[in-house]
Amino acid sequence: MGGWAEDGKTYYIGQSFRGVNGILPIIDVTDPYNAKWLLWTFTGDGRPHDLSTNQDGTRMYSGQPGNFGVAPTNSSFGPDGLVILDMSDIQFRLPNPQIRIVSRLFWNDQGQAEQMLPFFSHGRSYLISTDESGGQAGVGGLAAACARGASAYGYSNVIDITDDTNPRIVSKTMLEVHDPANCSKFLAEPPEVGGGILDYSTERCALDRPRNPTLAACGSRGTGTRVYNIRDPLHPAEIAYWKGPAPRRAFLPDPVAGHRLSIEPSKSKRVWRAL
């Protein structure tokens, strides 16, 4: 994971950490033929899984991955959610640059925060977040997640960052599989054949445009592509989806990784369905 500053002169690399401490590799490509490393060592909050920046490059929106209760040696140790960082020293190439935390917004009903997608709507600034594992990835697994009222699987928050010192979750784009009230219904579900536990977490989202968007399309691990009307960020509503059929006919061993590969029929139709 990683992301460019909006001016294209700085590239930030996420996921370069183990446990609570680590580094944030920063690459200065002002001269692309003479790229330079600008490593930042941090302790505590701010380590990004995925990331984005504001238009002038002075703010980083870090999706900090955490799974409820995991050990400090785990790469997803610590709180899960958004950390907004002041990147001004890096952006302006100041000597002895420092990165400062502007604000934090954490949640413990999901796991493994990933994307932080910026957009503007009717004069306000927002982010769409994704979490790629949900509560089931925390200590105790799915049963413990259900017991504490967490979502079994990761979903998207819409976060108002107009005041970046006080980010606020203003809405949630949840399907029925994400509703904590339905968590216990999955306890009796068998694991996917050859694929481990079920996972309906929302992985990535994209917008039709960054200013006053009308649609957000989000891809997930198990629910296909879901399309939301986001004209009103406070009340996003699903309007369509596409989920490809997967009637497995056979499993073959993967000689490289030892995994099993499913063979799918090639004549299935792809259909959008309006809700």
Image (tube, rainbow, N blue to C red):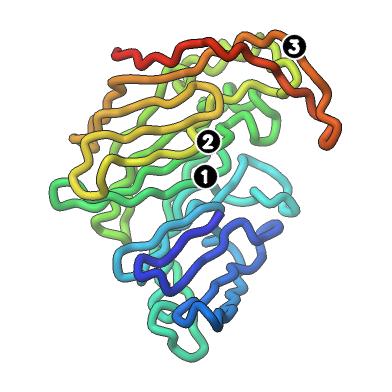
* Residue receiving disc 1: 113
Q: Which residue is mark 3?
A: 250
Q: Is residue 259 left or right of residue 201?
A: right
Instruction: Residue at 42%, 81% (x, y): give it.
Output: 89
Q: Position of residue 156 (x, y in %)?
A: 41, 36
Amino acid type for the residue under numbered disc 2: Gln
Q: Position of residue 121 (x, y in %)?
A: 19, 46
Per the image, the residue denoted by label 2 is 110
- Helix, strand or loop for disc 2: loop
Element at badge 1?
strand
- Compared with 98, 135 (above or below) is above
Asked whether 89 or 80 is in front, the reply is 89
Contact between labelled residues 1 and 2, with CB atoms less than 8 Å apart: yes
Q: Give the amino acid at mark 1.
A: Ala
Q: Residue furthest front?
A: 267
Residue 189: image location, x then y, percent: 65, 11
Q: Residues within 10 Å of mark 3 (few under 14, many from 20)?
A: few
Query: Dot 1 surroundings within 10 Å: few (below 14), some, or many (20 or more)?
Result: many
Quarter of the figure that contains the C terminus: top left
Residue type of the residue flagged with mark 3: Ala
Residue placed farthest to the left in the image? Answer: 122
Pair 3/2: label in front = 3
- The front one of 112 and 181 is 112
Decide which of tag 3 and tag 2 comes sooner along the chain.
Answer: 2
Q: CA distance from mark 1 to mark 3?
A: 34 Å
Q: CA distance from mark 2 to mark 1?
A: 8 Å
Residue 150 in view in this figure: no
Badge 2 density bin: few <14, some 14–19, many ≥20, Cα 10 Å: many
